[in-house]
Image: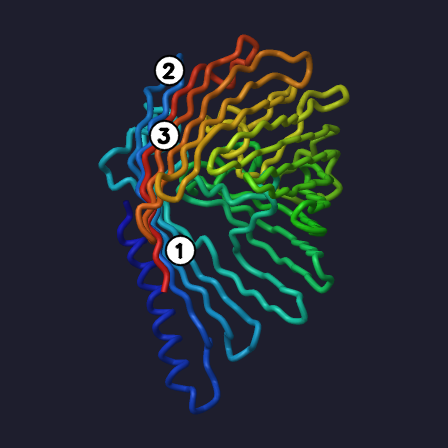
């Protein structure tokens, strides 16, 4: 752990917060304040992780890491009503206690939590007449993170250097548009200098991408979203997503249905200089029932094989991929013949007992329905107090007979984590 970096960052944030607060108070008589309100927040998230893929020449990995976050949100900046600012620093460390994992040691398998410290958020927002303008580094997500996510499960989140606008002038309608100049990946700068979006170990990705997201919430039963994500030199994706829920005396039934089409990129000048020739489809159908705490659901998701001469398949390089197709992270990249993920969810949720959920995945290829294996994911989460939570989680993947060799073999992963959050 680089204590000097962490302490320097923490001291800088604290000094900025306290000095601007004092300055604002001292100059109230002069009619000027640097900000009119503030919220300081802190997170400490220690976690043990174990990862082992059979037949891997590297040794199984173990890591005891922590996420330490210190941030502040400030309103009424410079005395301007509607002007807000956010500043946040995040440190990821292993303390030198349990660090048997790559990239800390090349003899071991991968756990994607290298030691690093960075500014994870530094942005301003200005809201006027139901319209919010955004500029800076932001933890930005859309919908269920399938396309745009913050990869929050990893200790260092994914953030975006961007400008954006959110308009809510029309009741029930939200229009979001953004331009992303850089994606700050979960990996540290010491790991890779590559800016290839399909290199999972890239630290940053300089891009030239545009995001458009339009949602109309008709009522709780039906909400419709249209989107376009134009990632420079990679691909354009346009789609529709419908979600909703119906309440009954015994519980609630919720659903999601989504379709997207992915084609050749219309934007250029990104640092990824190989424009992909893409023509692939995406489909998803899901339904979930919650009855007196009992949860059951089924989901069918298809990341289609690309049509045409060259290989490839539907991909979502800016997603929170860990939460999509199994927690063992076997399919962070889509196989060239596409991926079909049929999953069944069973669980029980209770405020006193906690959340106990199991998800069973069956994986096949989109082309020819090849056997890509199956996976059982399990999680137990419990809120121990107002500020402290516990999570125990496991992923057990069994390799399919037709899985391409580069995706590895049977994989076991499990985690034990505490999460402390405080704000004032």
Along the polypeptide, which appears first: circle 3 or circle 2? 2
Q: Secondary structure at mark 1?
A: strand
Please rate how many residues cluster around mark 1, counting C-alpha atoms within 10 Å: few if below 14, some from 14 to 19, many from 20. Answer: many
Between the C-alphas of marks 1 and 3, the distance is 24 Å
Label 3 sits on residue = 102
Q: Determine the image quadrant of residue 362.
A: top right
Check the image and name the residue furthest to the front. Answer: 249
Q: Is residue 66 visible?
A: no
Residue 103 position in % (x across, y down): 37, 32
- In the image, 202 versus 144, the foreground residue is 144
The mark lying in front, picked from 2 and 1, is 1
The mark lying in front, picked from 1 and 3, is 1
Q: Tag on residue 57? A: 2
Contact flag, marks 1 and 3 (Cβ < 8 Å): no
Label 1 sits on residue = 89
- In the image, 2 versus 214, the foreground residue is 214
Q: Is residue 105 visible?
A: yes
Residue 350 position in % (x across, y down): 41, 40
Q: Secondary structure at mark 2?
A: loop
Along the polypeptide, which appears first: circle 2 or circle 1? 2
Q: Secondary structure at mark 3?
A: loop
For the C terminus, the quadrant is bottom left
In this picture, residue 297 sits left or right of residue 8 = right
Please rate how many residues cluster around mark 2, counting C-alpha atoms within 10 Å: few if below 14, some from 14 to 19, many from 20. Answer: few
């Amino acid at each position: 752990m680089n204590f000097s970096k962490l302490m320097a960052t923490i001291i800088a944030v604290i000094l900025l917060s306290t000095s601007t607060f004092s300055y604002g108070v001292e100059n109230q008589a002069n009619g000027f304040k640097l900000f009119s309100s503030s919220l300081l927040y802190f997170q400490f998230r220690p976690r043990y992780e174990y990862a082992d893929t059979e037949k891997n020449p590297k040794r199984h990995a173990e890591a005891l890491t922590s996420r330490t976050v210190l941030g502040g949100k400030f309103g009424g900046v410079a005395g301007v009503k509607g002007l807000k600012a956010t500043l946040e620093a995040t440190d990821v460390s292993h303390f030198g206690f349990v660090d048997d994992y790559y990239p800390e040691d090349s003899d071991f398998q991968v756990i994607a939590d290298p030691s690093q410290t960075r500014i994870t958020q530094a942005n301003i927002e200005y809201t006027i007449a139901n319209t919010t303008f955004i500029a800076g580094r932001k933890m930005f997500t859309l919908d269920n993170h399938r396309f745009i996510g913050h990869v929050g499960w990893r200790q260092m989140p994914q953030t975006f250097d961007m400008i954006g606008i959110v308009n809510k002038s029309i009741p029930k309608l939200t229009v979001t548009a953004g331009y992303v100049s850089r994606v700050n990946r979960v990996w540290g700068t010491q790991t890779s200098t590559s800016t290839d979006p399909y290199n999972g170990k890239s630290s940053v990705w300089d891009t030239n991408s545009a995001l458009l997201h339009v949602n109309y919430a008709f009522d709780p039963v039906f909400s419709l979203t249209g989107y376009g994500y134009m990632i420079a030199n990679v691909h354009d994706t346009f789609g529709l997503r419908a979600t909703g829920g119906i309440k009954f005396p015994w519980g609630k039934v919720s659903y999601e249905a989504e379709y997207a089409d992915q084609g050749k990129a219309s934007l250029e000048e990104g640092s990824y200089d190989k424009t992909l020739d893409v023509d692939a489809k995406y489909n998803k159908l899901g339904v979930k029932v919650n009855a007196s705490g009992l949860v059951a659901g089924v989901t069918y998701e298809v990341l289609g094989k690309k049509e045409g001469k060259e290989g490839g398949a539907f991909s979502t390089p800016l997603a929170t991929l860990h939460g999509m197709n199994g927690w063992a992270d076997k399919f962070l990249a889509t196989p060239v013949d596409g991926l079909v993920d049929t999953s069944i969810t069973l669980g029980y949720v209770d405020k006193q007992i906690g959340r106990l959920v199991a998800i069973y995945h069956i994986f096949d290829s989109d082309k020819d329905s090849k056997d890509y294996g199956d996976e059982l994911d399990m999680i137990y989460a419990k809120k121990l107090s107002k500020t402290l939570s516990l999570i125990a989680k496991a992923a057990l993947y069994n390799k399919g007979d037709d899985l391409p060799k580069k995706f590895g073999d049977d994989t076991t992963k499990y985690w034990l984590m505490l999460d402390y959050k405080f704000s004032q």
